[in-house]
Image: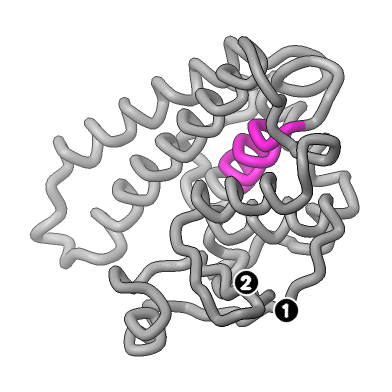
Amino acid sequence: MKLIGRNLSPYSRRIAIAMTLLDVPHEREYLSVTADPDRGLEINPVGRVPVLELDDGERLIESGVILDYLMELVGPAKSLVPPHGRSRRDCLQLMAIATGVLDKAVAAIYEVRRRPAEKVHEPWRQHLLIQATGGLKALEAHKQNPWMLGDFLTLADISAGVTVSFLRVMLPELVPADAWPKLYDLCERCEALAAFQAHPLETP
């Protein structure tokens, strides 16, 4: 298998970390679709990463789809999503919130970095930041000890961990340490894991 995408992308990074935690062998193609949009469109109809290319040539797109495939691949005994009940729903909900925070934060970053200064719409950027903050509040409120769901590591932790790490670098004003003590604790726990250290966050 080949995972395509840079570790600057938290969506790609969470796949790489999960694959390492699950001992799923894979190669990497560190693609920037901004630098090489033609390659992006070649592997994904909408030109985005991550993409997981399977051994038979099938390509899976979108990190949620890829993670679902990986959990099916390793089976319920190794899955990083609880098998049923409230804990499963909580895990999936928290993953959705974490990626929602990323979606809004990335849009806010692009509003400044991808537009000429005179075309930045600050009210829209502030709206995006409010939405991202709402998601962070939900994650902070739900965080148990030591992990999001208590004693066991799940994809909710990986998703929240890569989100906070990304924001600390790319949008630090959104995540001051004193505002999110539980999420900072989670981020530090995650980044101390060998699987996280094997796929460090890239900087632009």
Task: Look at 31% across and 26% down and name the residue there.
Answer: 130
Circle 1 packing at 10 Å, graded few (<14), some (14-19), many (20+), is few
Task: Look at 86% across and 18% down and name the residue there.
Answer: 151
Q: Main secondary structure of the magenta part?
A: helix
| Region rendered in magenta | 154-165
Kindly identify the amino acid type of the residue bearing the numbered disc 2: Leu
Question: Looking at the rendered structure, which numbered label has been put on residue 27?
Answer: 1
Q: Residue 103's x, y, as percent? A: 37, 44
Task: Look at 67% across and 39% down and name the residue there.
Answer: 161
Q: Say which of 47 and 160 sits in front.
A: 47
Kindly identify the amino acid type of the residue bearing the numbered disc 1: Glu
- Image quarter (top left, top right, bottom left or bottom right) of the N terminus: bottom right
Question: Looking at the rendered structure, which numbered label has been put on residue 3?
Answer: 2
Q: Residue 149's x, y, as percent? A: 72, 17
- Say which label, 2 or 1, has the lower sequence index: 2
Q: Say which of 80 and 124 sits in front.
A: 80
Whether 60 is among the magenta residues is no
Pointer 2 with pointer 1, Cβ within 8 A: yes
Q: Is residue 60 left or right of residue 147?
A: left
Q: Quadrant of residue 85?
A: top right
Above or below, comparing residue 190 to residue 198 in the picture: above
Cα distance in 3D space between marks 2 and 1: 6 Å
Above or below, comparing residue 86 to residue 60 in the picture: above
Q: Quadrant of residue 164?
A: top right
Q: Is residue 49 left or right of residue 123?
A: right
SS at mark 1 in the image: strand
Q: Quadrant of residue 75?
A: top right
Whether 158 is among the magenta residues is yes
Above or below, comparing residue 61 to residue 130 in the picture: below
Q: Residue 194's x, y, as percent? A: 90, 53
